[in-house]
Image (cartoon, grey):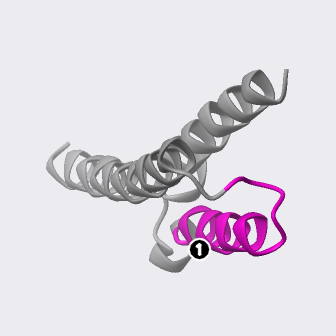
Amino acid sequence: MLGVIFVVGSIASLVLEKYVLANNSRVWLGAIVPILSIILIIWLMLTNLMQFNILNIVLAVVYVSLSFIFWGQGNDLYHQKVVNRIYE
C-alpha cells in the first residue's frame, strides 16, 4: 500500500511540477519540487523510514532525475508559449 501511495504521489508531484510550477516566468518556482524531493529522500534515509538498499536508491535517483527533467520540460513549455505569443 505504501508503494502505491508513493507512486501516485510521485506522478501527481511531477505533473504539478511540469504544468504548474515550472511553466511560468519564475525559474526558481520550478525548483521547489526537485529540492524538496532531495531533502525528503535524505531525511527518509537518515531516519531509517526508507531502507538503505539498492532498490530504494535506484527509485530515489530515478525520482530526483525525473523531477529535474520535468522542471526542464516545464521551462521549455513556458518558453515555447512566449515565442508563440510573440510571433502571433
As drawn, which residue projects farthest toward the front? 53
Q: Answer with left or right where residue 78 lies relative to residue 5.
A: left
Residue type, label 1: Ile
Residue 42: x percent and y percent? 66, 73
* Viewport quadrant of the C terminus: top left
The chief SS type of the magenta part is: helix
Residue stretch in magenta: 31-51
- At 56% from the left and 42% from the top, the residue drawn is 14
- At 77% from the left and 64% from the top, the residue drawn is 44
* Viewport quadrant of the N terminus: top right
As drawn, which residue projects farthest toward the left? 87
Number of numbered discs on residues? 1
Q: Is residue 62 above or below residue 33?
A: above
Q: Residues within 10 Å of mark 1 (few under 14, many from 20)?
A: few
Q: Nearer the viewer, residue 76 or 57?
A: 57
Is-magenta flag for residue 5?
A: no
What secondary structure is marked by label 1?
helix
Residue 65: x percent and y percent? 38, 55
Quarter of the image for residue 4 reads top right
Residue 67: x percent and y percent? 47, 53
Q: Nearer the viewer, residue 12 or 85?
A: 12
- At 56% from the left and 36% from the top, the residue drawn is 15
As drawn, which residue projects farthest toward the bottom? 28
Which residue position holds label 1?
35
Q: Is residue 8 above or below residue 55?
A: above
Quarter of the image for residue 27 reads bottom left
Is-magenta flag for residue 37?
A: yes
Q: Answer with left or right where residue 33 lies relative to residue 87.
A: right
Q: Is residue 59 above or below residue 86?
A: above
- At 53% from the left and 65% from the top, the residue drawn is 30
Q: Nearer the viewer, residue 36 or 25?
A: 36
